[in-house]
Amino acid sequence: MERRRLRIALIPGDGIGREVVPAAQRVLDAAGVAAEYLRLDAGFETFQRTGNALPPATVEGVRSCDGALFGAVSSPSTRTPGYVSPILTLRKELDLFANVRPALSAPVTGSQEGIDFVIVRENTECLYVKQEREEKNGARVVAERVITRRASARVTQTACEIAMRRAALRGEQKALLTVVHKANVLALSDGLFRTTALDVAEGYAGLEVEEQLVDSMVYRMIREPQRYDVVVAPNLYGDILSDAAAALVGGLGLAPSANVGDGYVLAEPVHGSAPDIGGKGIANPVATIRAAALLLEQLGQGDIAKRIENAVDAVLSAGVWTADLGGQATTEDVTEAVCVALQAERSVAIRR
Ligand code: GGG
């Protein structure tokens, strides 16, 4: 099948981002993806070197591509004049309003069985608008939390569409959407998210809709993760819930995500830059390899994405595990094993 040649932006960022993004690029090559790559700078190291954590050329370059693969950044926890978080800014600049984070059981000892749900996190507002101010000489700090009807509606629409697509793939008529909020305490802000989400979801026939307070959601997700299908949540709750969900299926080393907007997708591992292990060659590349697969799926190459996911599963099933999973494999070992699994499968397919 003749495929469109893709143009993909690669933004390794900081720390282990610089190891796992090249690993994922190797896997894309081994899978036979027809693509040209544009490598772009961003992150704290870029800030230290150039005074800009997200150079305009990076934003321009990202826009010139069909999609992007981002690694990780290490934003400082203290206020740093002139520094902006490149990933938060990119999400805003490109209007990537939904962050799609699958939680899927994996063949590793740290994963529970039978889990297959997706958290769809609102990606542009909530506390992440970073409107903080000091009062009373710094003795009191106020952080504004923004929730809008528009953002709540479009993230819910994305979640509903994912739910319907997943049901169709399962060959079922029914899907379940869980709307997470804390409207019993934050009646205005979470109240708006809740009513908007419930209104939007009502328009999808065959979609069962439930709502859950965020605290009880954490509890139930840990006790009965197998019951969930698609979960939609405001930004901060979605961020926290998705890290917790990753812990149920093998950890952050395996967890991919895709930031999606109306016409663009930027995929990334859920994990950060892990500066403690950066440069040691021991980072788990699987989350980024899976993120690359999510990117392909969004760009209409779901068949290659599936082959990459199968190759990753085969490698994990064979026990080729990095230290975060309890193994001794290096980044290179895992990457090479996935490439070999893909190439073996490709040559069988070509012989057929
Ligand atoms: N790949 C996701 C990532 O880098 N996560 C860390 C994160 O969210 N950082 C935000 C920031 O440092 O500005």
Image (spheres, helix red, strand yellow):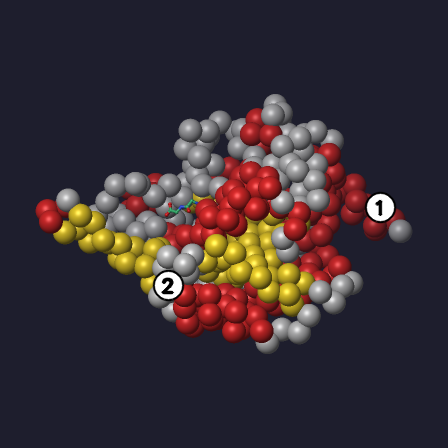
Kind of residue at disc 1: Val
The secondary structure type at the circle numbered 1 is helix
| Residue highlighted by disc 1 | 348
* Mark 1–mark 2 distance (CA, rounded to whole Å): 58 Å
Is 150 situated left or right of 227 in this image? left
Residue 350, position as x, y percentages in the image: 83, 51
Classed neighbour count for the residue bearing mark 1: other residues with Cα under 10 Å, few (<14), some (14–19), many (≥20): few
Which one is in front, 304 or 128? Answer: 128
As drawn, which residue projects farthest toward the bottom?
A: 203
- Please report the residue visible at 50 percent of the width from the left and 65 percent of the height from the top: 155
Q: Residue at x 65, y 68 (%)?
A: 207
Closer to viewer: mark 1 or mark 2: 2
Rendered residue at 73%/34% (across/down):
317
Where is 288 relative to 56, above or below?
Answer: above
x, y (%) of residue 135? 14, 51
Report the residue marked by disc 2: 187
Query: In this view of the protein, which residue sits in the foreground, 314 or 141?
Result: 141
The relative height of residue 107 versus residue 99 in the rendered view (above or below) is: above
Q: In the displayed structure, does residue 149 sit left or right of residue 114?
A: left
Is residue 133 visible in this depiction of the protein?
yes
Q: Amino acid at mark 2?
A: Ala
Q: Residue at x 58, y 61 (%)?
A: 210
Q: Position of residue 44 (x, y in %)?
A: 34, 43
Q: Residue pushed farthest left?
A: 137
Name the outermost residue toward the front.
184
